[in-house]
């Protein structure tokens, strides 16, 4: 297909989506929006379809593992459905007599969503559900390796739509193996962009001229201080680090341990499957090939990763991840960045202040604005991190991967896309959630005057500084 035909194809898809969205909103109701969102949710959560999507994702991308993708597809979608269940997204959603303002929910229009190969089922499902809940249409641009999974997901969603008489054109994708040219055109003509994945795609979204919700890079660093429950911390870090073979942007990439408990914590890590590597060259020599992550290492099961690194027989039987001692931080020290593998950089800090300094340095190198973690029994230390680190989230005494993107045991919205604020070059510092997919029209009525005197505003200032 030549470039003219490719662009025309995208324009035709968006035109159909825009027409379908107009009909959806004009004839809509809260019930209609809710049912469409439920249809998309059940399309991925139905057990047989969930398994097929998970198996297809691993088979075609070579990333992650089936059991964890099944869990991710289920829990992320279930949590999202809980979050949106009572949300009002149609008609009058707020009426305040005191201000005279009535807010009317309005859809954004056509959402253009660029989705990554690491989560080719859960991430598009999340975006689709949020879009439908708020009365939008959505067009997906999956990564080339994620195309088969997206195609299967849309097939399941359309089958559910057919049961309800919902227009299939509300949920579409750019067909074929994808191209930068097609994606660029989608970025230019959609009404709102949601972009998760490579920072190249994020930059393209922000410079497209279309309003964009895009997220920053993850590179989670977690502090274990001298007051932490070491056994609990080690168990949570192992569960989080190994989940779906570290494909999540919220997977721990570095653990910074205070010297007083360093040896004891390393012992706890070894009990939970973490093998200590004291010579980082044993890992860096093969984890990066010509400056790029080795595809035979990233997002692989432990035995395959260990074999690709040439460490079979050099680590204990049953090793689930590698904890590699290192000191360096920055471009010349690849272990200090995101690794997308069951490899964890391990830093030794003199004390908590030093651990904070190391963590700050890691975040400034890569992952600024995303999130950091803390295992402690000292309550005020989380606030110290929140004030000192360029981060949008401080996750306390939790398995980071499961907590950052929403959990049934914390108050974060369920999401697979974490905004990183200005630190990460993003327009949002929250988890991407349903409210980002809706705008409002304000009806403004006159109310009794609320005009202060100059003295009401400046009296205390004059007392201190004079007129």
Image (tube, grey):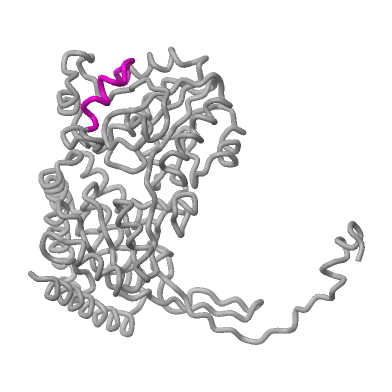
Q: Is residue 284 magenta?
A: yes
Visible residue check, residue 100: yes
Left or right position of 143 against 337: left
**Residue 386 location in percent, x, y?**
56, 41
Viewer-nearest residue: 434 or 245: 245
- At a point 24% along the width and 68% down the height, the residue shown is 139
**Residue 108 location in percent, x, y?**
37, 74
- At a point 50% along the width and 23% down the height, the residue shown is 228
Q: Quadrant of the C terminus?
A: bottom right
Visible residue check, residue 168: no
Q: Quadrant of residue 184?
A: bottom left
- In the image, the segment drawn in magenta is 271-288
- Up-down: is 322 above or below 260? below
Viewer-nearest residue: 132 or 255: 255
Left or right position of 342 against 224: left
**Residue 176 location in percent, x, y?**
10, 63
Q: Quadrant of the N terminus?
A: bottom left
- At a point 43% along the width and 38% down the height, the residue shown is 365
- At a point 33% along the width and 22% down the height, the residue shown is 323
Q: Residue furthest left?
A: 1
Q: Is residue 447 magenta?
A: no
Q: Quadrant of residue 295?
A: top left
Left or right position of 278 against 377: left
Disc tally is 0
Q: Quadrant of residue 245?
A: top left
Viewer-nearest residue: 175 or 101: 175
- Up-down: is 315 above or below 117? above
**Residue 331 location in percent, x, y?**
37, 35
């Amino acid at each position: 297909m030549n470039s003219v035909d490719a662009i025309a194809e995208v324009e035709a898809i968006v035109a159909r989506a825009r027409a379908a969205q107009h009909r959806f909103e004009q004839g809509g109701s809260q019930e209609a929006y809710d049912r469409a969102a439920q249809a998309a949710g059940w399309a991925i959560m139905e057990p047989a379809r969930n398994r097929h999507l998970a198996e297809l994702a691993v088979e075609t991308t070579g990333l992650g593992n089936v059991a964890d993708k099944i869990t991710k597809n289920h829990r992320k979608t279930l949590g999202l459905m809980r979050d949106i269940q009572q949300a009002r997204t149609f008609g009058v959603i707020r009426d305040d007599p005191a201000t005279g303002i009535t807010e009317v929910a309005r859809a954004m229009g056509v959402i253009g969503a660029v989705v990554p190969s690491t989560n080719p089922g859960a991430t598009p499902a999340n975006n689709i559900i949020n879009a439908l809940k708020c009365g939008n249409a959505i067009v997906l641009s999956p990564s080339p390796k994620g195309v088969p999974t997206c195609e299967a997901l849309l097939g399941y969603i359309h089958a559910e739509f057919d049961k309800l008489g919902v227009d299939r054109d509300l949920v579409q994708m750019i067909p074929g193996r994808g191209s930068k040219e097609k994606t660029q055109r989608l970025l230019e003509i959609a009404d709102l962009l949601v972009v998760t994945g490579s920072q190249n795609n994020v930059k393209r979204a922000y410079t497209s001229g279309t309003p964009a919700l895009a997220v920053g890079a993850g590179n989670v660093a977690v502090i274990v201080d001298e007051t932490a429950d070491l056994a609990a911390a080690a168990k949570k870090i192992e569960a989080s680090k190994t989940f779906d073979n570290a494909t999540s942007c919220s997977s721990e990439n570095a653990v910074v341990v205070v010297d007083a408990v360093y040896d004891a914590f390393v012992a706890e890590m070894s009990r939970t499957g973490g093998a200590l590597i004291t010579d980082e060259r044993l890992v860096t020599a093969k984890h990066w090939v010509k400056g790029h992550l080795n595809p035979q290492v990233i997002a692989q099961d432990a035995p395959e990763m260990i074999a690709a690194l040439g460490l079979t027989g050099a680590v204990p039987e049953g090793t689930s991840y590698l904890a590699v001692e290192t000191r360096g931080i920055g471009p010349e020290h690849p272990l200090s960045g995101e690794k997308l593998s069951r490899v964890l950089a391990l830093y030794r800090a003199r004390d908590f202040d030093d651990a904070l300094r190391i963590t700050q340095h890691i975040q400034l190198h890569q992952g600024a604005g995303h999130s950091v973690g803390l295992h402690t029994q000292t309550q005020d230390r989380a606030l110290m991190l929140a004030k000192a680190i360029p981060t949008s989230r401080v996750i306390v005494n939790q398995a980071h991967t499961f907590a950052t993107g929403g959990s049934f045991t914390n108050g974060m919205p369920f999401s697979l896309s974490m905004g990183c604020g200005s630190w990460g070059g993003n327009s949002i510092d929250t988890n991407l959630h349903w409210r980002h997919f809706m705008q409002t029209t304000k009806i403004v009525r006159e109310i009794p005057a609320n005009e202060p005197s100059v003295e009401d505003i400046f009296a205390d200032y004059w007392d201190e500084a004079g007129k």
